[in-house]
Amino acid sequence: MSSRNNWGAVRKLPSKRFQASYIGPDGERHTASDTFVTKTEATFWLAQIRVSINEGTWLLPSREFEISTTPVFESYALRHIELQTNRRGELLRESTKSVYRRILKTNLRLFLKKELDQITKSQVQEWYANLVKTGKKTSASKAYKLLSAVLKRAVDDDVIDKNPCNIRGAHSATTGKPVVIPTVDEVISIANAIQPRFRSLVMLAAYGGFRFSEITELRRKDVSPIEKEGCVSYVINVTRAVTSVDGKYVVDKPKSEMSAREVSLPTALTVLVNDHLFSEVPDDPEALLFPNASGDHLPHYVFIKAWNKALEQAGISRVGLTPHSLRHFAGTHYHLAGATLPELMAWLGDSSISAVQRYLHVTDRAASIASQMEISRDYKSAENTK
């Protein structure tokens, strides 16, 4: 709350104290170097300033000691990104910070130059509605969550009184686009059609459930053969992930604590992994399994280009079939093979049941499953009761 005229203003702060400011003879607004317990005290201070101006004794205050106005959203949001922690109390990763900074510059640019107390509920509601109308509901939700988090910090810091973000359902809104997963035959067709150096990547993603950030950081030292009952298979040790941050590759821990895991591969992939290790990967523990042409990390766009070309050559035209569909394929088929939800969580490296359930999809086994359903022997069909 504030009272303002063309010259002076008194404003009540979230701390319940009062801030006074005025426009000086220099044409600039100046703020008192201290706050006041009551509005009367602040008004009296303004009156004294008015007298000094009228008498010609006014001196330009030192900006160093003036109390600043409410912070601008951009600078406060950047500070929030640097101070924010995750659920384990850790500072955000550089890759996450980069994503948030990109959201600020794109979907939240409307608020960047606004002072925090100038952001109103109606502005937020109008901004969100306009963004949703463009069809970018998921992007709108991500931007809204960042906006809300920044303004919540401002409330906690007593910078503003209330958080203007109160849109129902905005935190969890999604476009609702269905995830498309390939069939077994389509996985094989894609693997056969893609560039030979990516064939093993497709198969390991489909039958190991790796994220792209995980599989492109795998090195020879992460692959271990094991023998059980005369059969050799491989175990992949996932301890790192790589992401691109402002054009540079950053290697860090995987996405979550559960993501650091050992992934057992089917024995059917043993020959494929052997061939890849000894024909494509240098004999160096640090050698990447799937590098780019220069031996550095594989860019996502390079693999996407090869993936799309493979789909075309394989005659697969289903919209929404992406490399991430292979992780959904892996989760679905690992579950069909008998894995419980906790086992699936451990195998995929997800930290919650709700997260892992995203990877479970309907398959074409409905008819065969139905045929195996047991019916009580006491049941008598309509034909037998005639």
Image (cartoon, helix red, strand yellow):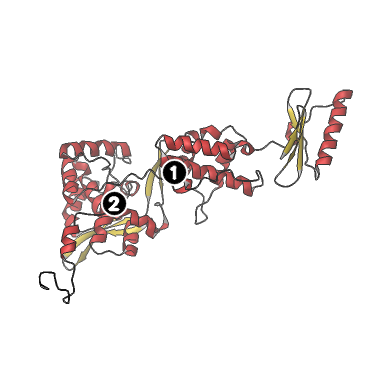
List the residue tagged with mark 2: 328
Closer to us: 108 or 289: 108
Quarter of the figure with the C terminus: bottom left
| 164 with respect to 296 (left or right) | right
Whole-angstrom CA distance, mark 2 to mark 1, is 23 Å
Amino acid type at image mark 1: Ser
Q: Quadrant of residue 191?
A: top left
Direction bottom: furthest residue: 378
Residue 189 locus on image (x, y percent) = 16, 45
| 194 with respect to 114 (left or right) | left
The answer to whether residue 103 is visible is yes
List the residue tagged with mark 1: 95
Q: Quadrant of residue 321?
A: top left
Closer to us: 24 or 307: 24
The answer to whether residue 293 is visible is no
Binning the other alpha carbons within 10 Å of mark 2 as few (below 14), some (14 to 19) or many (20 upward) gives many
Which numbered tag is attached to residue 321?
none
Compared to 82, does 54 lie above or below? above
Residue 355 locus on image (x, y percent) = 38, 55
Residue 364 locus on image (x, y percent) = 19, 54
Q: Considering the numbered disc 1 on the image, is that residue within a helix, a strand or a loop?
A: helix
Q: Quadrant of residue 29?
A: top right
Quarter of the figure with the N terminus: top right
Q: Residue at x 79, y 27 (%)?
A: 60
Closer to us: 150 or 273: 150
Q: Considering the numbered disc 2 on the image, is that residue within a helix, a strand or a loop?
A: helix
Amino acid type at image mark 2: His
Residue 368 locus on image (x, y percent) = 16, 60
| 22 with respect to 226 (left or right) | right
